[in-house]
C-alpha cells in the first residue's frame, strides 16, 4: 500500500471516518485500474464493515467533503462495460497540491503552463506571414 500519511497535503487519521474513506479508496485503487464512483459508494464502502459506511447520507457527505477538499479527484471516462456513456471515476490526490480558485472549489480540467518566449499563436502567425 502506498504511503497514506498525507493526501493532498492533509494528514490522514485512519481512526476518523475521512481517514477510513481514504484508506478504503486506496485499497480499491490497488484492486481496480479505475474505480467507478457509484461502485465505490454503493458497493465497496458498505461491504467494508465500517459502521458509518452503512448510512448512504453519511457516505455521500464524506465523499462530497473529500472532493471539495481535493483529497479525491474525479474523472469522466468511457469504460468498456458501460455502453450508456462516460462513467465518473475517483482516485486519491497523491500530488500533495490543494488548489483553490476564487469562487470555485474545483480544479479546472485545463491549466495553461508558462514557457519562455512569446505565445505560440504569434509564432504561427509570423510563420504564415513569412510564407506569403
Image (cartoon, helix red, strand yellow):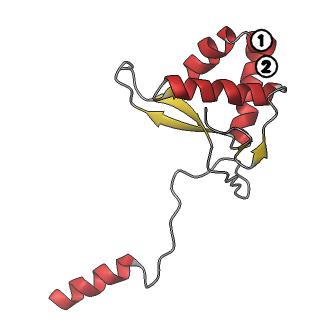
Left or right of 50? Residue 96 is left
Q: Are marks 1 and 2 in contact (CB under 8 Å)?
A: yes
The residue under the point 73% across, 14% down is: 56
Residue 7 image-quadrant placement: top right
How would you rate the neighbour count of disc 1 (Cα within 10 Å): few for under 14, some for 14-19, many for 20 or more? few
Left or right of 41? Residue 34 is left
Give coordinates of residue 122: x percent, y percent.
36, 82
| Residue most extreme to the left | 132
The residue under the point 37% across, 18% down is: 81
Q: Nearer the viewer, residue 62 or 119?
A: 62
Identify the residue under disc 1: 55
* Real-space Cα separation, disc 1 to disc 2, in angstroms: 5 Å
Q: Nearer the viewer, residue 109 or 115?
A: 115
Residue 20 image-quadrant placement: top right
Please tell me whether residue 82 is drawn above or below residue 105 in the rendered image: above
Q: Say how many tags the image has.
A: 2
Q: Nearer the viewer, residue 59 or 97?
A: 97
Identify the residue under disc 2: 58
Amino acid at each position: 500500500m502506498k504511503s497514506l500519511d498525507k493526501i493532498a497535503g492533509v494528514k490522514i487519521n485512519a481512526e476518523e471516518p475521512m481517514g477510513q474513506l481514504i484508506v478504503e479508496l486506496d485499497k480499491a485503487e490497488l484492486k481496480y485500474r479505475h474505480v467507478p464512483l457509484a461502485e465505490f459508494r454503493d458497493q465497496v464502502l458498505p461491504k467494508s464493515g465500517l459502521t458509518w459506511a452503512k448510512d448512504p447520507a453519511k457516505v455521500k457527505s464524506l465523499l462530497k467533503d473529500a472532493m471539495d477538499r481535493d483529497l479525491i479527484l474525479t474523472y469522466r471516462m468511457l469504460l468498456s462495460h458501460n455502453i450508456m456513456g462516460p462513467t465518473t471515476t475517483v482516485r486519491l490526490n497523491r500530488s500533495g497540491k490543494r488548489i483553490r480558485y476564487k469562487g470555485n472549489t474545483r480544479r479546472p480540467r485545463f491549466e495553461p503552463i508558462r514557457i519562455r518566449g512569446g505565445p505560440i499563436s504569434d509564432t504561427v502567425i509570423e510563420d504564415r506571414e513569412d510564407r506569403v
